[in-house]
Amino acid sequence: MDEPQSSLKPARPPPPQRPPQPTMSAGQIPVEILPLQPHEIRWFYKEPGRFWVPFNGYDSLMLEERYQTLRIGHQDFFSKSVLTPVRGELYDANVLERNGISVYWKGSTIKLLRGEWFEVISDKWYPIEEDEAQQIEAGHCSTAWRLKYNKDVGLDMQISGSPSLAMRNVARHKITVSKHEVVWFNDMDVRWFKTSDYSSKVMNFVGRKLMGKDETYGSKHLRRGYWDICRQTDCLPPIKHVVFVIHGIGQCMEGADICKSTNELRDTCEKVAQRQFSDQWKQGRVECIPVEWRTGLHLDNGMVDSLTLPNVRTLRNILNTSVLDVMYYLSPTYGPEILDGLATKINHQYKLFMDRQPEYIDNGGVFSIAAHSLGSVIIYDILSLHKTDVCDAPLEDEGRHQLLQELQEAKTRVLELEAALSKRSFVPNKLSFQLEHLFILGSPLGMFLALRDVEEHVYRHHKSAQSLLPASICKRIYNVHHPSDPIAYRLEPLVNSAYEKVKPVKIDRCNAGPSDTAHELACGPRKEAEMEPPQKKGGWLSYLPSLAKGSIAVSETVVNASAVNSMDKKMLKDDSTLLPKDKLYERLDYQLQEGTISSSYFNSFTAHTSYWSDTDVAMFMLLQFYSYQPSAPPMGP
C-alpha cells in the first residue's frame, strides 16, 4: 500500500516556543505582542474573477517557510528556488511576486495573499489585503495605548474590584486604514468601520446618537491569525491515476477552453470521490491534465480565413473554427500534422509530469486518457499506429494474419507519401507511456471507422467479440455518450452486428451510487475467460484485438445471435435483458440516463459539451479506476 503523501514530504522542525509573558493583573493585556507563528498564518489564492480561497495547511506552511527564507536571506529573485509547487503541483507559486503560474497549461495565473488579519462576517473569515493588514498590525502592536489601557484597568480594579462594563465599550486606539477606521476596544476586540462613503457615516451617526447605540454600532470584527491552524497532515492524497484530457473541435472558438473543462472534470471527480470512494481517494487521488493541441498548429496559415466571404461573417467564423477542424483532419495535407501535434503534446505533458513525479510509475501510478469528440478519433488513430509484436485476438489462419500486417504497413506508407507530397515530414509518433484506460466522450469514432471501407469489412468479418485496441496498448476502452448527443455514435455493432439491437449499458446515477452490475462490469471478464489457452502471437494491426468469446459477469439470458437479430428493438428494454450467444468479454458502449421530464431535442443543444461537469460521468470513471471496492456492504434498495 502506498504511503500517505504527508509522510513523503520533507520533515519540518517543530514551531519555536513563545517566550513566557510577564505576569499581568486581571483584565490587563500584554504590552509586547509577539509575531504570528507560521501555523497561525494562512496563505490564500485567487483565480481571475473569483474570491480568495485558502491553501491547505501543508501548502500554506511551505509558502510561509519559503517567504521567511527569502525575506531573511538574499536568494536570487529569478532563481527557481523562489518557486513553490502548490495545489497538487498544478501551479508554481512565487511568494515574492505574489502569483502562481500553471504548470501544464499557458495563460493561467493565480494571485497570492499572505493572511494575517481577517474580517469575520457570519462566521466566515475574509483575509485583509496585505498593505492594510500591515498597518493594522502596526497599530495592534503599539505599546502606548496598551500601557494606558492597563493603567485604566488598574485604577478601575482599585475602585470597584473588577473591570467595569463601561470600559469594555470605550475605544482605546484608533487608526485610519484605506477606507476604514480601525478601533481597538481591548486586545481581543478589534473592529473596523467603513468611512469611505457618506451613507456609512450617516448610518453610524444615526445608530450611535439617535438610537442610543454604543461605538461598536455598524462595525465588523477583525481577528489576528487564521481560525484553523496549519497542519502538515492537511494535504492532498498522493496521485495514483493521471488522466490526460483531450479536446475535440472548436478549441479556437471564443469561450472554448479545455483547461477550464479539465478543471471542471477534476473538481467533479474530487466531489464525487469524497462521497462515493472516500477510502480509495485517500490512498490515491485522480489528477486531470489538459492536452491543448489545436491552437499550436499553423495548418493553412490563415488561407481559409482569407477565402471566407464577408457576408454573415459571424456564422462563417463559427464554422471555420469548429467544423473546419474535421476537414483539416481528413485532409491528406494537414491530417499527419494534427496526428503528430497531438502525440507530441501528450508526450510533452507526460514528461512534465514525470519530471515532477519521478517515482510515480514505481509507486504503482497509471495513465489514462479522456478524449472528447474529434479528439477521440485522433487519439485512436495515434494508438493504432503503435507497433507491437503481441496480439491477444484469435487469428483464423496465418494467411489472414499476414494480410493484416501488410494492410497496416500500407496505411503507414500512405501517410508518409501524403506528407511527402505536401512537403511535410511525417514519422508516426507513438506515446511514451503505457495506457490503462481510454474514455471517449461524445465520440464519432464509430462513424469514422464505419466509413473507412477496409476497416468495416474487417470488423464485420469478426462477429465474435473483439476489441478495437489490443490490451498491450490499452487495457480498456469506454464509449461514453449522452443519448441526445448528436455527435456520438456506438462502437459495439461495429464489432459484433448482433449488438445492433442490444442497448448500451446504462451508467448509474451518482446520487444512487454504483450498482452491483456496474461493479461487475468494471472488474472485467470472468476468470474462465482469462484462463483460455493463449493464442498464437503475431501482428495486431487489424485494429481488432483483445476481447474474444466469453461472458459478462452479470445475470442475463443467453440467446442465439440470430434470435436477437430477429427481435424488435423495443423488446430489449436495457443492456442486461438479452445478449447474443457470441458475447463480448467487456462492454464498450455506456450511456448516460436522461431525466424523466427532459426533452431529447432540447438536451441535444447542450449534451455534447456536458460531460466535464456531469457527476454520473465522474462516478463512472472513478469506478473504473478503483474497481469499486466498497468499505461497507451495499445497502438494500
Image (spheres, helix red, strand yellow):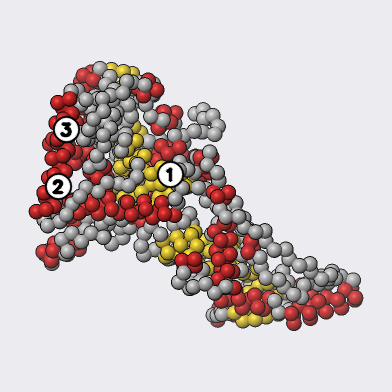
Type of the residue with mark 2: Leu
Mark 3: which secondary structure?
Answer: helix
What's the residue at 67%, 61% (across, down)? Answer: 15
Q: Name the residue under label 1.
A: 361
Relative image position of residue 469 (x, y in whole percent): 27, 36
Work out whether mark 1 precedes mark 2 in sequence or the reverse, and give the earlier one. 1
Type of the residue with mark 1: Ile
Work out whether mark 2 precedes mark 3 in sequence or the reverse, and give the earlier one. 3
| Quadrant in the rendering for residue 203 | bottom right
Work out whether mark 1 precedes mark 3 in sequence or the reverse, and give the earlier one. 1
| Quadrant in the rendering for residue 518 | top left
Residue 78 vs 529, above or below: the answer is below
Q: Mark 3 points at which residue?
A: 404
What's the residue at 55%, 50% (across, down)? Answer: 8
Q: In this view, does 632 lie to the left or right of 575?
A: right
The residue lying toward the viewer, choosing from 594 and 630, is: 630
Q: Name the residue under label 2.
A: 415
The residue lying toward the viewer, choosing from 317 and 627, is: 627
Relative image position of residue 568 (x, y in whole percent): 23, 24
Give how far apart the Cα atoms at labels 1 and 3 are. Answer: 33 Å
Mark 2: which secondary structure?
Answer: helix
What's the residue at 13%, 63% (across, down)? Answer: 303
Q: Can residue 576 be seen in this view?
A: yes
Residue 401 vs 25, above or below: the answer is above
Kindly indicate whether the residue at mark 3 contacts the one at mark 1 (C-beta within 8 angstroms). no
Give how far apart the Cα atoms at labels 2 and 3 are. Answer: 17 Å
